[in-house]
Amino acid sequence: MAVKYIVNGKLVLPDGIRAGAALAFDDESGKILATACEVPADADVIDAEGAFVAPGFVDLHIHGYLGEDASDASAEGLRKIAYGVAKNGVTAFLPTTMTVAKAQIEAALCTVRALKEESRTWAGAEILGVHAEGPFINPKKKGAQAPENILAPDAAFILENADVIRLVTLAPEMDKDHACIKCLAADGRVLVSMGHTDADFDEATAAVRDGVRHATHLFNAMSPLAHRNPGVVGAALASEDVSVELIADTFHVNPGLYGIVAKQKGDKTVLVTDCTRAGGMPDGEYELGGQPIFLKGIECRLADGTIAGSVLKLNEAVRNLLAYTALPPHEVFKMASLNPARAIHADDRIGSLEVGKDADVILVDDEINVHLTVKRGKVIYDARA
């Protein structure tokens, strides 16, 4: 056993922050051994230098980064994404496919299947599986997704690939009698999310009753909250069973809503990036789902002006929540770590700094700049080196 201690930091635990408390982990087993513990005089220490010592971030919705896209079905591309987002504090993620041709989705699933185990030990974020955003969506709310690739919800296809699909986004109103939703809910392996949907409040509420437990990028590409028809947004906010994604880039959702959502949804609030291949790249023209997209600043759009994903980094999302709300820091960190892990039932192993869990740990300063990323006890990014 090779025990290391992170000292002189602000330890971010599920119930609060412990300034000056130490964290012990075994860099061989990759597990957390103790929190808020005593440090032996001869210990092997990492000095946090006053930074937050937080759980690694978990991104449930990210299409790409650094010019690469999950739907390309490229092993090298996924590796590049995984290594790149580690610099943003991400230690685990769901590469997210979109409404492309079914054969292309199948190829992407095969690529993830081949890399999933390897990703647990490589020097990048771990691939937990796939978020299949579509192709089971409503053309009226397709957003930046190509309408010719939209299909009716298909439970058999999802279950055939449930070894890698952890989350699927679909439009409940396109699912006759909610047969797909009910089938997936009964199986239990895949989190069912409503998104890219024009369902009204009653339809969305029925879908939740039938097994929907998540809402994809709340407010975006769904029927809005109105006082006579609360829409999908209203159904998602009203249900205690539904977790909600929030793209907190200050563009997709007005920052004035961040605190309102967090107050209503609590631990069901999940920060995501919805990042495209334009993430980490200069302004210019890129591609998303076979369509050209144009990046200018923080805005990604199709030629007709339709919003097309983001270039958000998950540490930036945390920074924005802290800047625009009065929420305590430990609650905001949970939105990017424990809450997403819990949504896909991975919180037994990741998402918080608790004894027995993987030593996925990040050091971030008060501006949420990432200084160090540790995954399963191994340093995978060190800005201080």
Image (cartoon, helix red, strand yellow):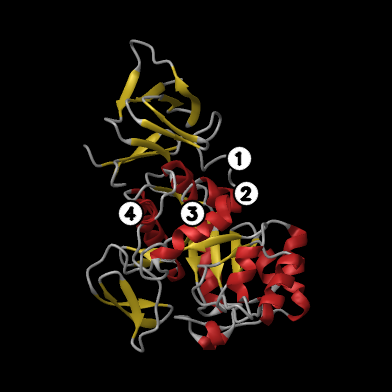
Is 278 left, or right, of 34 in this rendering? left
Q: Are marks 2 and 3 in contact (CB under 8 Å)?
A: no
Name the residue nearer the viewer: 192 or 106: 192
The amino acid type of the residue labelled 4 equals Gly
> Percent from the top left, x then y, of residue 11?
41, 32
Q: Amino acid at mark 2?
A: His
Q: CA gap, disc 3 to disc 1?
A: 22 Å
Choose between 335 and 43: the one closer to the eye.
335
Depth check, front residue: 195 or 233: 233
Distance from disc 4 to disc 1, alpha carbons, whole Å, reads: 25 Å
Marked residue nearer the N-terminal end (4 or 2)? 4
Q: Which residue is mark 1?
A: 348
Q: CA distance from mark 2 to mark 3?
A: 20 Å
- State the separation of the CA atoms marked 1 and 2: 7 Å
**Label 2: which residue?**
345
Compare marks 3 and 1 and give the one earlier in the sequence: 3
Query: Mark 1 and 2 residues: CB-CB less than 8 Å, in contact?
Result: yes
Report the disc number at residue 84: 4
Earlier sequence position, callout 2 versus callout 3? 3
